Image (spheres, rainbow, N blue to C red):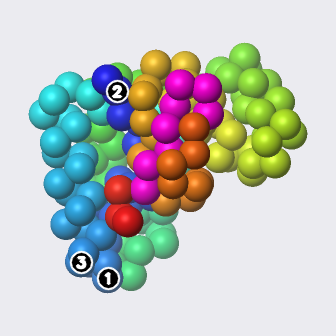
């Protein structure tokens, strides 16, 4: 079993403005990392760095954010390449997803993930062998 984490779940780890979601994100991420089930993509790492240094009420300093990216880059990673981008374009057109959501879905499928943890897609939706789960419900 593998769990693919969307960027928003990682952001809540550092969001002091959302204490309940922060605690839940910590619980889920730590559990999946300890069980060696967590997987990310290079897209998630990029989005995480930008958003954690700019979008939070109390943004992380760039040096701290870089350290977290270094930590997360030790997890299994899907590298976004041209083939994956083209697959995401196709999925976004077929399923009316945003390109960025389609790229997350394609990365999770490529990683062999059983579930995609995100609050951006419909909880319970199944896409091929991938189940969408909102860990904050």
Q: Please give the label number shown on residue 19.
A: 3
The kind of secondary structure element at disc 1 is loop
Q: Please give the label number shown on residue 17.
A: 1
Q: Is residue 14 visible?
A: no
Residue at x 24%, y 75% (from the top left corner): 20
The CA span between labels 1 and 2 is 29 Å
Label 2: how many Cα within 10 Å (few below 14, some 14–19, many 20+): some
The CA span between labels 3 and 1 is 6 Å
Residue at x 57%, y 38% (from the top left corner): 126
Q: Is residue 23 left or right of residue 3?
A: left
Main SS type for the magenta part? strand
Image position of 40 with respect to 18: above or below? above
Q: How many marks?
A: 3
Which residues lie in the magenta part?
A: 127-134
Label 3: how many Cα within 10 Å (few below 14, some 14–19, many 20+): few
The kind of secondary structure element at disc 3 is helix
Q: Please give the label number shown on residue 81.
A: none
The quadrant of the rendering that contains the N terminus is top left
Q: Are marks 2 and 3 in contact (CB under 8 Å)?
A: no
Magenta-drawn stretch contains 130: yes
Q: Which residue is mark 2?
A: 2
Q: Nearer the viewer, mark 2 or mark 3?
A: 2
Which of these two is toward me, 125 or 118? Answer: 125
Which of these two is toward me, 67 or 98? Answer: 98
């Amino acid at each position: 079993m593998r769990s693919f984490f969307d960027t928003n779940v990682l952001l809540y780890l550092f969001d002091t403005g959302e204490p309940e979601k922060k605690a839940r994100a910590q619980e889920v991420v730590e559990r999946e990392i300890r069980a060696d089930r967590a997987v990310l993509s290079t897209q998630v790492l990029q989005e995480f760095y930008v958003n954690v240094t700019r979008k939070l009420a109390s943004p992380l300093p760039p040096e701290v954010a870089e350290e977290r990216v270094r930590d997360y880059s030790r997890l299994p990673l899907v590298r976004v390449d041209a083939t994956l981008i083209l697959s995401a374009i196709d999925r976004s057109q077929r399923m009316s997803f945003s390109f960025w959501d389609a790229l997350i879905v394609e990365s999770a499928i490529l990683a062999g993930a059983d579930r995609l943890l995100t609050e951006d897609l419909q909880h319970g939706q199944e896409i091929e062998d991938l189940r969408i789960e909102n860990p904050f419900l």
